[in-house]
Image (tube, rainbow, N blue to C red):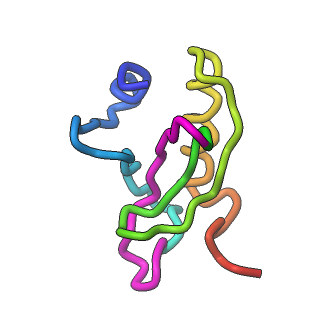
C-alpha cells in the first residue's frame, strides 16, 4: 500500500494508523469545523476504512481485497470520495 500511495504522491509515516489524503478543490469540508482531511486506514479485524484526520473519528467501512488489485481499487474509491463525488459520507441522515 505504501508503494501505491507513493505512486500517487501521497506520503505515509511509520507512526500513523491512517494516511490523510490531500485536499482537492472539490473536497467536502470534513469534520465539525470543516478543517479535517479524509484519511484511509486498514484494520486487521475490520478491513479498509475511511476516517477523518482527527481523534475518535467515525469510520466508513470498506470491504476489499488486500492484493495489488484490491489496493488500487480501494485507493481509487478513496480518491473519488475525497474529491466529493458522494458529498460528505460522514453526515448522518
Quarter of the picture holding the C terminus: bottom right
Image coordinates for residue 38, horizontal then vertical, percent:
46, 58
Quarter of the picture holding the N terminus: top left
Nearer to the camera, 27 or 55: 55
Nearer to the camera, 56 or 29: 56
Looking at the image, which residue sits at the far bottom? 33
Residue, x 57% and y 15% (percent of image)? Answer: 68
**Placement of 16 over or under 72, stated as above or below:** below
**Placement of 28 over or under 3, stated as above or below:** below
Dominant secondary structure of the residues highlighted in magenta in the image: loop
Image coordinates for residue 43, horizontal then vertical, percent:
51, 41
Looking at the image, which residue sits at the far top? 68
Image coordinates for residue 86, horizontal then vertical, percent:
70, 60
On screen, residue 62 versus residue 7, left or right, reads: right
Residue, x 53% and y 62% (percent of image)? Answer: 26
Please provide the residue range marked out in magenta.
Answer: 30-45
On screen, residue 5 versus residue 86, left or right, reads: left
Residue, x 36% and y 68% (percent of image)? Answer: 54
Q: Is residue 35 magenta?
A: yes
Looking at the image, which residue sits at the far right? 93
Residue, x 46% and y 84% (percent of image)? Answer: 32
Quadrant assignment, res 2: top left
**Placement of 39 over or under 42, stated as above or below:** below
Image coordinates for residue 48, horizontal then vertical, percent:
58, 41
Quadrant assignment, res 89: bottom right
- Count of marks, rendered view: 0
Amino acid at each position: 500500500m505504501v508503494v501505491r500511495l507513493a505512486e500517487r504522491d501521497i506520503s505515509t509515516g511509520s507512526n500513523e494508523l491512517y494516511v490523510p489524503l490531500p485536499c482537492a478543490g472539490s473536497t467536502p469540508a470534513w469534520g465539525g469545523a470543516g478543517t479535517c482531511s479524509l484519511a484511509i486506514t486498514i484494520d486487521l479485524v475490520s478491513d479498509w476504512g475511511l476516517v477523518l484526520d482527527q481523534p475518535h473519528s467515525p469510520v466508513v467501512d470498506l470491504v476489499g481485497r488486500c492484493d495489488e488489485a484490491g489496493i488500487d481499487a480501494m485507493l481509487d474509491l478513496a480518491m473519488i470520495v475525497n474529491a466529493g463525488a458522494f458529498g460528505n459520507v460522514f453526515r448522518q441522515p
